[in-house]
Image: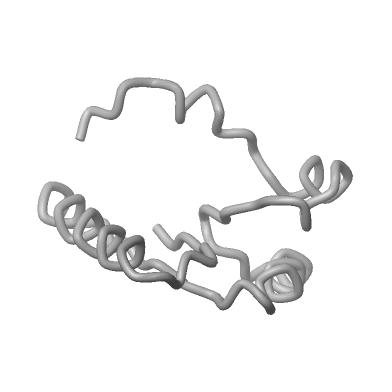
Amino acid sequence: IRFAHWQLENGPREAFDRLAREYMAMHPGVKVMQIAIPEKIYPNWMITQLVGGTAPDIIQTRGEADAERLARYFVPLGHLASRPNPY
């Protein structure tokens, strides 16, 4: 599972690493990898990944993803994110 975000400040990356290690320990056949991209280049990086077919499994979005791009490349996860987390 590859996921991308722009949270480069202290704390989030370390927390994501810890969560990934814990998840992988519970699911030995799964590898979790975070891709931390600087916020300044994130919009262009994201578009390049989507168009090139190399996008990670989960991408943090914000205003750079317009309605057409969201409809073409993304699957809404809101219904899953609102469920209680079993982990």
Query: Which corner quadrant holds the N terminus?
Result: bottom left
The answer to which of 23 and 19 lies nearer the viewer is 19
Q: Is residue 37 above or below residue 83?
A: below
Q: Quadrant of residue 51?
A: bottom right
Query: How many discs mark residues in the rendered view?
Result: 0
Name which residue lies at 44% across and 62% down. Answer: 2
In the rendered image, the vertical position of residue 66 relative to residue 83, given as above or below: below
Q: Position of residue 29 (x, y in %)?
A: 21, 57
The x and y percentages for residue 50 are 72, 64
Q: Is residue 24 above or below residue 6?
A: above
Q: Position of residue 34 (x, y in %)?
A: 39, 67
Q: At x 29% / y 29%, what residue is drawn?
A: 85
Question: From the image, which quarter does the C terminus lie in?
Answer: top left
* Left or right of residue 77: residue 46: right
What color scheme is it?
one colour
Q: Residue furthest front?
A: 10
- The quadrant where residue 81 appears: top left
Q: From the top left corner, tell me how far across and down residue 54 is, in percent.
A: 63, 70
Q: Residue furthest right?
A: 68
Identified at 34% across, 70% down, the residue is 10
Look at 51% across and 63% down and name the residue there: 4
Frontmost residue, 52 versus 35: 35
